[in-house]
Image (cartoon, rainbow, N blue to C red):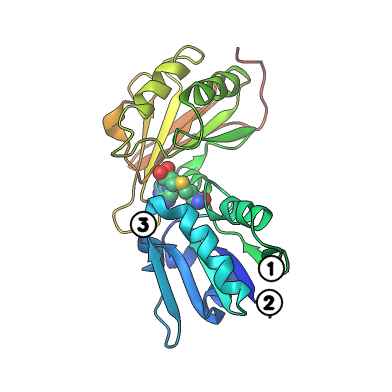
Amino acid sequence: MSGRLAVVGLGPGDPRYLTPEAEAALAGAQALYGYAPYLERVPARAGQNRHPSDNREEGARASAAPRHAAQGANVAVVSGGDPGVFAMAAAICEEIEAGPESFRALDVVFIPGITAMLAVAAKIGAPLGHDFCAISLSDNLKPWELVERRLDAAAGAGFAIALYNPVSRARPWQFASAMERLRRHLPSSTPVVLGRAVGRLDERTSVTTLDAANATDADMATLVIVGTRETRVIARPGRSPLVYTPRAAAEVSA
Ligand code: SAH
């Protein structure tokens, strides 16, 4: 008997950002797997089993969910934001590729969610209005030298850059080090947007510059957008500034 596995994006936190498709998948699941704080966002339903796990148990979660589904259950694995952006979808695909034949027989669906960079960008204007890329500053799954090479390449080619996982308790120095690296390529006045806990009660969005951005500005719940040479800040009387990257790019930044 082969079950169903839905890999579901919950969006950044506000229930208004949960898509109807995600809501339906959560309502229909017999078992839910996910990082405990994400599971707490899903309303309790009678008869539904919950399997909360720790943030560092991504691998265990990624193998337990398809095993459960392969027994014939309708299982949902949840991620914050979009499951395909530094989250569970790739971990599940790795399990399916490496796992038993029964995993390949599963009915698997990936249900998109609003990822943090899009939620933060929408709070402040259009900082990702032209070409952009996303880089995770976590060096848990890749060496820091590779992060540095990607920062050099992205800034050198004129991309706006969304930085996920800027710092954590175990990784206190990465954000400051990334800012230092980017200052080699970009003017010190380059706008930097910091969006914290967007879509939640304690959300906060602010604008600074590459020169002024430092480690204390960001925590685990912060998404950072570093603009390009073209990115502009529009000051508005009595309102927060708008930050945008124009649709036309004039020059190569390097
Ligand atoms: N799958 C998630 C990203 C997981 S990586 C997504 O698509 O959004 C975790 C990182 O995402 C955090 O360190 C932070 O940089 C960012 N993030 C997640 N939720 C956020 C939120 N509500 N506000 C700001 N940043 C957030």
| Label 1: how many Cα within 10 Å (few below 14, some 14–19, many 20+) | some
155 versus 27 height, above or below: above
Which residue of the protein is positioned furthest toward the front in this rendering? 100
Q: How busy is the neighbourhood of tag 3: few (under 14 within 10 Å), some, or many (20 plus)?
A: few
Judge depth for marks 3 and 2 and give the one in front.
2
Q: Which residue is mark 3?
A: 54
Q: Amino acid at mark 1?
A: Ser
Q: Quadrant of the N terminus?
A: bottom right
One can see residue 235 in this view: no
Q: Residue at x 60, y 68 (%)?
A: 6
CA gap, disc 3 to disc 2?
27 Å
Quarter occupied by residue 111: bottom right
First along the sequence among labels 3 and 2: 2
User: Is label 1 in a helix, a strand or a loop?
Assistant: helix
Q: Amino acid at mark 2?
A: Ser
In front: label 1 or label 3: 1
228 versus 115 height, above or below = above
In x, y percent, where is residue 203? 33, 51
The spot of residue 151 in percent (x, y) is 53, 23
The x, y position of residue 38, in whole percent, is 40, 62
Residue 240 versus residue 149 in the image, above or below: below
Element type where label 3 sits in the image: loop
Residue 102's tag is: 1
Query: What is the C-alpha distance between the residues marked 1 and 3?
Result: 26 Å
Q: Residues within 10 Å of mark 2 (few under 14, many from 20)?
A: some
Q: Which one is in front in this view, the residue at disc 1 or the one at disc 2?
A: 1
Q: Residue furthest bottom?
A: 46
- Closest to the observer: 97 or 108? 97
Q: Which residue is mark 2?
A: 2
